[in-house]
Each structure stands twice: as C-alpha cells, then as structure tokens.
Image (cartoon, helix red, strand yellow):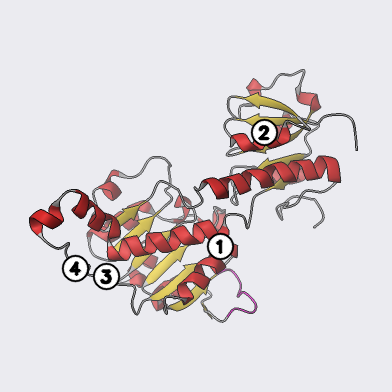
Amino acid sequence: MSDIRPKILIPGQIRERVILRLQEKCDIVRIERADPDLIDPELAPEITGAAVSGRFSAELMERLPALRIIASFGVGYDGVDVGAAAARGIVVTNTPDVLNEEVADTTLALLLNTVRRYPQAEAWLREGRWERDGQFPLTPLTLRGRKIGIYGLGRIGMAIARRLEGFGVEISYHTRTPRPGVAYTYHSTLLGLASAVDTLIAIVPKTPDTYKTINAEVLGALGANGVLINVGRGWTVDEDDLARALRDGTIAAAGLDVFQDEPHVPRAFLDMPNMSLLPHVASASVATRDAMADLVADNLLGWFFNGAPLTPVAETPYPH
C-alpha cells in the first residue's frame, strides 16, 4: 500500500457520508460545482480520483491529467461522459443493487396510489370531508385483472416483477433482447408490449435509444383503461404527448417519480386529478442513500488500496 494519500475531487454536493468514509485515507478537494475553471491548476495534476453526484464532463476530465477513477453516486450514470472516460483510460463506477428493493417498493406504492387514489383519499380525511361530505368516491380503476408490462427488465425491473407476482397480475416485458430464464412474456418492441397490456411501468436508463420512446403512439396502444408508471428517467416520456393523452382520455392515469427537467414539473401535470406525482424519491431513504454512499467510497478505496473497484460500468476499461 502506498503512503501517499490519494486526492479525491468532489464537484458540487454529495452525501456527507461519502466524505466521512474517504477522508480517513484520502485528501478531499471540493469545488462548488462541476466547472473546470474552479479547479486549482496547482492541484489538478495531483487529483487521481473523483466522487460525483451529477455531471462530470469531458472538459473536467481534460483538466485532470492524473485522473484514474470517477465514482458516481447512483445506479444511473448518464451525467458522466463515459465515452470520454473510456478514451482516457478512466474507470467509472456506479451504485447498482443497493437501491433495487427501495425503488421497487416505491414503484408498487406509486402504482397503487395512481390506480386507487390513496393520496387523494387521505387528503379527503385530513380536510374533514369524510365527516362533512361522507365516503370518499369509489375509484374507477383497480389493480385486479390488470396486464402489466415492464419496460426494462434489469435488476430493478426484476425486483418490481417479483413484487407484482404477489398481486396475481399478468406480467410481460420489453428489453432489447429476451432475458434468459425469465418466464414473463417477451415483446420485441415497446409498441408491441403496450398493445398487449393496459399498464406500462418504465424503468429504463437515460440513453439515446430511450429518448421519448413513450410517445403518443405507445400511449394510444395502452388504451382508455391504460396506466403509465415511470420510475426510470423523465427523458423516456414525451411529456406533451402524455399531457394530451391524459386530458383526452387516451389513457386513464399516470404516476411519475421522474421528469424531463427536474425539479421543474409541467404545470399541466400539477392540475390533473388523474396523476400521482412524486419528487424523484424512489431510493430516498436514509438506509438506501447510506448504502449508496458506502459503495461510492468503497469503489474509490478499493481502487486505490486494493487494486480494483467493486462496480465498474461496462463502458469503461477495467477488466471485469
């Protein structure tokens, strides 16, 4: 083990637990945001690692000639220019698995809230309307008998599917290729999946292939009894098409935890009674965020002190 303490750059905010874990063996270099001009030129050649929650651009990498690893906080790492990292021999890591169960739990809660309108029912009680006006209106939708399609059957998608099995619903899925050893019905296109189900759960990452793939055509295929749930990326949904589909009855309801331009939420969504909206909280528990922070730190400590990161992403060069 080297006696030299690695210098780790942290641009912007990150969970404090990451810093607490790292500072025992590393020197932390903090800048206000991911701006290359904020890096001290004298320190830049000494920075060999980075921990980030958000963006890390190619321009930032160019200012750090000794950078060897970027540990990203989150299962999604679309804010990091992995192509530039790969070209420079920089390993990028993320935090998979530790948030699967929490996100799957939230997905089921959001689905139930959307179909059965539980938040509105609680508001009815809190506002005194149960006593004043009587029973909360019957919900027109139910989970009973639904056919559910999962768009993206990765680790989190599988955790969602396992939970759905307990509800006795029919499960189908769409991914680029069929997943081996899975009994759920596979559809080779998203449109084909939407045509076969009445409930679509999106849990795909932000990639060029997933941009606004849930559009007017897909929503139309879901039908008037259709429900859309998105816990992946707001990037995936054409929000204008969704607003129109909800207004004109093309689909019945939608539940969203993610949006195209967070934290901005379209005004049209806020005014719609057939939407359930959450402020991107799918993994937002102390336990899960601490586990993510630990994995960020363990990737960096593993690289510098054990010679290997724990969870490198597929696009970067570490052999795994």
Q: Assess disc 1: are there few (<14), some (14-19) or many (≥20) residues with their C-alpha within 10 Å of its C-alpha.
A: many
Amino acid marked by disc 2: Leu
Numbered range of the magenta stretch: 175-182
Q: Assess disc 4: are there few (<14), some (14-19) or many (≥20) residues with their C-alpha within 10 Å of its C-alpha.
A: few
* Residue marked by disc 3: 141
Secondary structure beneath label 3? loop
Q: Assess disc 2: are there few (<14), some (14-19) or many (≥20) residues with their C-alpha within 10 Å of its C-alpha.
A: few
Judged left or right of residue 259, residue 53 is: right
* Residue marked by disc 1: 156
Judged left or right of residue 145, residue 178 is: right
Q: Quadrant of the N terminus?
A: top right
Alpha carbons under labels 3 and 4: distance apart: 9 Å
Query: Sequence-wise, which precedes: disc 2 or disc 3?
Result: 2
Q: In front here: 5 or 83?
A: 5
The residue positioned 70% from the left and 37% from the top of the image is 21
Which mark's residue is nearer the viewer, 3 or 4?
Answer: 4
